[in-house]
Amino acid sequence: MAPRMTDAPTPRAAETPSTENLSTSPVVKVLLTTVDGADLAAALGTVGRQVYDPIPDVVVVGGESGETPDGVTTADSLEEAITGAGDDIDYLWILHSDARPRPDALGALVAEVELAAAALGGSKLLVAGTGEELESVGGSTDVFGEPHSGLDEGEIDLQQYDVVREVAFVRSASMLVRRDLAQGLRGLDELLPPIAAGLDFSQRARLAGGRVISVPSSEVYHQGRCNEHGHGWREQAGRLRAMVTAYSPLTLLWLIPYDFIVSVLDSLMSLILLRWRPAARYLFSWGWNAYHLPSTIGLRRRFRPVRVLGDEELFRFQARGSVRLRDVGAELAVRILSMFDEDQAIARGTRRVWGSSGIWGAAITVLVLVFAMRSLIFLGVPNVGASFPFEEAATSLDRWFAGWNDSGLGSSAPVHPSVGVTGLWSWLWLGAEGAARTLLTIAFGLLAVVGMGRLAGRLGYRGPGRYLSGLVLLAGPGTAILVGSGSWLALAAAATLPWAVRSVFVHPDEVGRGRLSHIGWAVLLGIPLAAFSPLLVIVPLLSVIVWKVSGGKDSSIGLTLVGLLGAVVAAPFILGDTGWILDSHRRLGLSVAELWPVLLAVAFVPLVFIDSKTRRLGTLGAVLGLSGLLAVGLGNGGPGVEEAALVLASFGTALIVATGLDVVSSNPRRLIGALVSVIILFLSIGILGNGRLGLPGGDFNERIEFASALAGDAGPGRILVASTQRDDIPGEARPGPGFWYRLVDGRGMTSDEVWLPSPLPGDHELDTALERISSGGELRPGILLAPFAIDWLILLGPTFRLDEVFVAQLDLVPTPFDPDSRVFANPGSAPLADSGTESAWLRSGTGFVGEPGSGRVSLAMNYDDGWSPEPGPHEWRATVSAVGGVAGFRGTTQNLVFAVSTAALLLVSLGLLFIARRRR
Amino acid sequence: MKYVSLMIGLALAVGVFLTSAPDAPEPGPAAGVEEPPVAVCAIEEGSGRTTEVVILSTVNGPTRLTLFASGESAGSISQPTGASGSVMIPVVDVAAVGTVGGLVELPISSSAAGVIVTGAESMSAESCADVPTRQSFISGASTIGGHAFELHLMNPYAGQAVVELVVRSDAGIESNDRFESVVVPARSSTVVDFTELIPGRETLSITVETVKGSVIAVGRQSIDDESAVWNAVEGSQDWFLPIPAGGGSKRLLIATPSEVEVEYQIDYYGPEGLEEVYAEGTLSPRGQDSFDLAAITEEAAGVRVISTGPVVPTLWINSDSGLGITTASAVEAARWFLPGAGAIVGGRASVVILSVGIDEAVVSVRSLRAGSLVRAINLPADSVVEIALETADGYLIESTGPIVAMWVTRRVGAGIAAMGVPILDG
């Protein structure tokens, strides 16, 4: 192999061409452009060692005259240097001072350019200090000027590109250009960074009729101090300017909008990959070009006389479509596929893909999952049970940060922690709450399946069961009845749980490495898990304990303890409503069929006798699943315990299925395990057939749309919903005299309203009023309900006592708005915020706004001294001064501290992951 | 470890299997049933007739009369019952209305209301109905020549009501689409004029089936210039009916809304005391029987009707003293209100008291007005007495034993017979 620039520079007289030959060589002038941090003397030295005659003059562009040795002139700008070249000069060799050309580089450049009758030639650039790593051999671009070198990252030079060819552009680090053309084009655009400058110059050279070629025999080692990696926003801005300078107006007419669309798509896809920089780069790029538009127009004018060819000449060397979109799309696809293809089966080639049983399992699972989510994809998420739309992002976040809990008659008690997550998610989706909710729900389905697959994979399983078990997690014995009762959060918890458990099991290859990353993930996953189902946050700890007791390794108690920090997200909610954990009367009363413990036991027993690895995971699944079922059956604790126990039951069952279906063989034990696992699988996925991941159908908010449509100036108030069937009531229900009931927002129920805070004086008053009404002793129930701003009453399910009572009353008007319920209007209802004047006060975020006045505004909300301004109680209601025209609420400092702590913890965990990634 | 895992897993499974599913949560206990102290009165104004609403109570408390028509309140007045426990409200003082309904809100449940409708030649009275029932029944009507009958359906409540009328006459079951799905709008009245729809029927019995909402039905019979008003009531199997003294046409009608045959027996409380199984018979489906009471005696008497199915006995009096129609009482009580008794100027009012206890009862008759008077009498078991009444807004009859009380008023050419209102809650 030929000596490289890293070799000691020694005179090579033997290779010096003869005088006769040199006398016919074109005259070259070297324009050495200075680069910050590059050694100019060394650069001059390498130029001086060029084996070329006549020896080229050297002009240092942008350097101080004192720094240059004798005989070397300087120029302030490249344009000045180009202009200063006399007619005796044939070629200009533009060279960066951080480039180290081999001694024959110039000679090769001149020879090939002459031979090809080209106007512009570029050297092959090798990364200095790496030996033979290729940096550039010229390249193509797409129509937007995005460079596409065709090189793989770290690709070694094995002379595979050593052929002279026409290219779209060459890099400005080392380019040879005909002097007359350079002077016609007035050199490089000095506003542009190196790659963009090279691109711009190459494009103009081509449009001026010149050929642009890559000369691989001219090798130059490039230190890269000029920052020619091409990813900065300046490069991007430069490409846009080069595009505007080179293309004809007709091309620009469609190209600029097209580029804008590509920018938006690239930004969005990059955001999915958690990269924000592309969006920022586009923003700066467009701004920079807008600022420099006058000079760009000037450039176009100067270039117009030189141009001889049309844009088609550029298109010949361009790739189709958008390189940027192709790259980011490919990366996204790889990321998605890698979620299922931990074995890299796909990457290894399609012929071997179907040899992986894990891929079979994943493929079947995805098909079932798509079928199970078809209704969600096409129709959205149903509004029923405990599944309701997200509130406006800003309002949700305000509630989360110790704002007013508007559920029922309102309370200062903190909202459910999931409200913060959904608020943040909606905010990330720029306030498109509906789309955010649908996408999140679909994501839950995918995450549950992938999470189980990845968890089982981390525990050493590769069989088809690991992904199929995700379906059991979604629709197993516990989640099926929870989701069937409308619990959207059961899906969320099921989706998060395997990831959180996985985060505390360290891959054998990573033991002792990436500690920051492990901590970051443990905390980051602990937060949503605790937000969706607070008590599940202890499951990773339980899993590790069972795993270790069973003789397993590669799990960390320390990480589980770190993950417990995520529980801070749920602390204010639990402290504000301990009944959610402790009060068994608030449970939904869900029970699991007696068949399930039998199935789990039958599936588990043969696994014990296979091998220690199988026994370990089987034991983990059996202990968790059966513990969950036991906790459900015992009936202790509140709805929080019930919810966590049911999800845990499904999680344990899913682990057993993953174990049972890991290896299917003729071994009788494995066969029994697999058979029972298949039975469990089929029993589970039945519920998914409804296309909503098991969520019940219907739209409660659509049924109560009349409340908004018929609302007066003060907006819709509240709706009292009552039924003898607990399931008929959306969200949590309160026990009334012989029936269940709750209040919902007349504008439509949102997810934050699902949970009812502990009863306050207003709630007790309402309970008393309903007791009196249901006794039949009240002729005017509407008057009794008016102070609670109850505009409408909806009786659901079979007829009951209130139906009888409302037959003989004077002020609730039966209204046939809903054929499936009995609706009564309460014309005498008070507004939610009553200023005592005709001017209505309306909801605004978590508070109210209205006409300022000197009086007070009575709010049909439970009193709390967090209301402002000048709060005061009126019976159970809150009143505030109307002076400012605004009524707002801020909760206790303790709740605020918890909320801020959660946000800080989230940022810290993200920071840890960022640092860990940078280190890697 | 293998067997430890197995034991733990199996122990948990057995534990789960043996744990019975927790009970489904239940709502709170149902509230005790109360009825709002209200009464619904049939108001008739115009054509020379005017109505007064009489409200009696055991307490001095607030009352409120609201006239409802065409879906809204036509007028309302609030007055206390005062120290006497009585108040009389002329409807003309409330609003100028026609045939409408009136809702009376009473101070407590031990209260009663009634209406007195007086015209130049006629007068009628009836207590105001309290609890609407799903099915009510009225008999004793007629549309033969000179007789006019209309059914006044009242719905004082906020929801629309719909009723089906099953009409049985001497011609059999009447078929008319005006009897089907009769709508009584909220806070309104609907008057069904049977004289126009099925004229020439000697006897009519009407079952009012409420399909939706709540309706109170009142019958209004006119014979020439005389009129009578009586409430439709729910059928029952045990009835008591005091019968005032007097001659003329005095008949007991026993009718049934049942679609099957009903056997009945009549126990007679005559001057000689109780005569059990004085008469008995069988009613054909939706049929009726009639007994001429005047033929038995012209003295005050009483009957008890016991049946195997729901029946409604009605007293039908048409004499020189005018027309009076009222239904029997399905309950006996120790205290009775007689709203309107003694209130008609120029009329001779009396109360007829039937003692149905096994012991002699001491009965006090208290006039409710300013300067109340009380008379006390001893009433032997199974006996009937008729006592003349002084002028008052109404009367409160109290007894040491179970009694049934009705009142009558007579004047030249006009009469009233109205059952009292029992006070059942002490």
Image: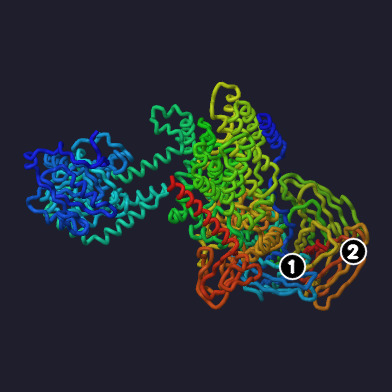
Above-or-below relation of B60 to A161: below
Q: Amino acid at mark 1?
A: Ala
Dot 1: what SS? strand
Percent of width and height locating residue A342: 46, 35
Question: Which residue matches tag 2?
Answer: B400
| Mark 2 surroundings within 10 Å by alpha-carbon count, few (fewer than 14), some (14 through 19), many (20 or more) | some
Mark 2: amino acid? Thr
The chain holding disc 2 is B
Does residue B133 appear anywhere in the picture?
yes
Circles 2 and 1 on the same chain: yes
| Of residues A711 and B120, the one drawn nearer to the viewer in this rendering | A711
Contact between labelled residues 1 and 2, with CB atoms less than 8 Å apart: no
Based on the displayed image, in which of its 4 quarters is residue A635 positioned? Answer: top right
- Label 1 sits on residue: B113
**Going from the N terminus, do you reach mark 2 or mark 1 first?**
1
Q: Quadrant of residue A868?
A: bottom right
Determine whether the residue tagged by mark 2 lies in a helix, strand or loop.
Answer: strand
Residue A215, percent from left and from top: 19, 40
**Viewer can see residue B162:** no
User: Residue A18 location in percent, x, y?
Assistant: 9, 38
Residue B154: give x, y in percent of width and height: 65, 62
Between residue A224 and residue A407, name the one nearer to us: A224
Q: Residue at x 62, y 48 (%)?
A: A535
In the image, residue B50 above or below residue A132: below
